[in-house]
Image (cartoon, rainbow, N blue to C red):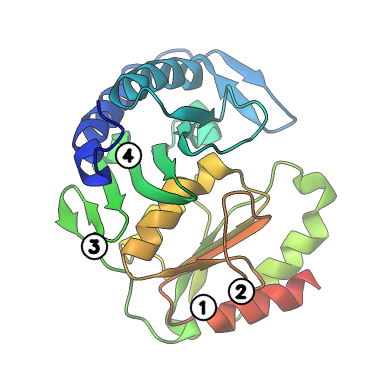
Amino acid sequence: MSSNISPREILEHVEPAVRESGDIILDNWSGAKSIRHKGRVDLVTETDLAVEKDLTAKLGRILPEAGFLAEETASGGNLGESTWIVDPLDGTTNFAHGLPFVAVSVALWRDGEVVLGVVHIPQMGETFTAVKGEGARLNSHPIEVSPAAELEDSLTATGFPYDIDTRAEEEVQRLKHVLVSTRGIRRMGAAAVDLAYTACGRFEAFFEANLKPWDTAAGWLLVEEAGGRVTTFGNQSFHPFAGTVLASNGHIHDELSALLSTSSA
């Protein structure tokens, strides 16, 4: 496929490829799961590896000149001129326990920005897509962020870092500030799902620290193309290697950023 092909044209090939690779998750859902530990609570299964292998092969055929930054095989952490950013199974712990909030996340980084994003949630039959400058969609239907304008009317989502044992007090303080100021907090266990749900208005905001590019790249584009806003906790420009992420509908962004910044101080 030509390197001059537009992100919209690329998406026409990427979306079915992601769905097909996601079927591996469904096929392996009910059987015994071979699990190993990358850290105390950081898991990887044979399914993670199988999806990544299948997906990178498919993406490699779609855009042969693009490199890869994929969770299970990432090395160096570099983003080239054209790079696929892939999380084959976001929510591995959910998968291991039979919880349905599991996603395949794929983004295309080109010339210094994310230009295409897909988040597929196989168990829910939901595929979120976005192309830079062309809006975001859920199963081909346009989506927008929530119109809620008040923090107290907002449902927020968050997650916890794998090194929570060294950050527990910081996380508790952050939760306390947000919990008493909002309608509530949810913890889905997969950042790609949280970002997709923020993009379609199910959550007003999502925040988390210590994520990786493959956790956030596709969802970042989804939120912005759905009319939302993505920054760091401190309201600075977001990038794939940022230490924190705050995604919101935009209306509550500054107020929530102030809360998070205070609790991180």
In the rendered view, would you say 179 is above or below 116?
below
State the residue position of label 3: 143
* CA gap, disc 1 and disc 2: 8 Å
State the residue position of label 2: 235
The one of 134 and 176 positioned closer to us in this rendering: 134
Instruction: Determine the residue located farthest toward the bottom in the rendered image.
Output: 150
For mark 2, give the secondary structure.
loop
Q: Earlier in the sequence, mark 2 or mark 4?
A: 4
- Which quadrant, please, contains the N terminus? top left
Instruction: Choose mark 2 or mark 3, whichever is in front.
Output: 2
- The answer to whether mark 1 and mark 2 are in CB contact below 8 A is yes
Q: Amino acid at mark 2?
A: Asn
Q: Earlier in the sequence, mark 4 or mark 1?
A: 4
Q: Earlier in the sequence, mark 2 or mark 3?
A: 3
Q: Which mark is residue 12?
A: none
Instruction: Determine the residue located farthest toward the right in the rendered image.
Output: 166
- The answer to whether mark 2 and mark 3 are in CB contact below 8 A is no
Q: Amino acid at mark 3?
A: Ile
Residue at image location 43% in from the left, 44% down from the top: 110
State the residue position of label 4: 120
Image spot of residue 174 (x, y percent):
70, 68
For mark 4, give the secondary structure.
strand
Res. 202 visible in picture: no
